[in-house]
Image: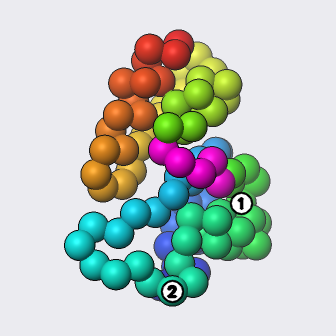
Amino acid sequence: MLDDFARSFYGADVVLITDIYPASEEPIEGVTAAVLADQLERFGHRNAVYVGHLSGAALRLAETVQPGDLVLTLGAGNVNQVADELLDAL
């Protein structure tokens, strides 16, 4: 389902992708954040960026967002911390 998942972000202007961490399951071989970012680019996304560890996402967002932009954080675990860190950075 990696290809379908990668295509699902095409409507977003910018997609920042952080590392994928498994919950209680084993990681799926060949499915990584870097691979997902490559797939988005392969399918023609204009601006998909692999940012690595979650801690780098808020700073990268602060450099990217403009007044009036909508920022969504999607994921599990502590990805919601990015929103708080972004507010602090702005």
The dominant secondary structure in magenta is strand
> Which circle's residue, 1 or 2, is located before the other in the chain?
2
Give the residue drawn at x 36%, y 44%.
Answer: 79
Q: Could you tell me the amino acid type at mark 2?
A: Glu
Q: Is residue 12 visible?
A: no
Which mark is on residue 45?
1
Q: Is residue 4 above or below residue 62?
A: below
Residue 73 in the image: state x and y as whole percent: 41, 43
Give the residue drawn at x 27%, y 67%.
Answer: 23
Q: Quadrant of residue 61?
A: top right
Bounds of the magenta segment? 50-54
Q: Residues within 10 Å of mark 2 (few under 14, many from 20)?
A: few
Q: Nearer the viewer, mark 1 or mark 2?
A: 2
Residue on which the image places disc 2: 29
Q: Is residue 89 above or below residue 15?
A: above
Which one is nearer the viewer's eye here, 84 or 22? 22
Question: 3 left or right of 28?
Answer: right
Q: Secondary structure at mark 2?
A: loop
Question: 80 left or right of 60?
Answer: left
Q: Quadrant of residue 41?
A: bottom right
Residue 44 in the image: state x and y as whole percent: 76, 66
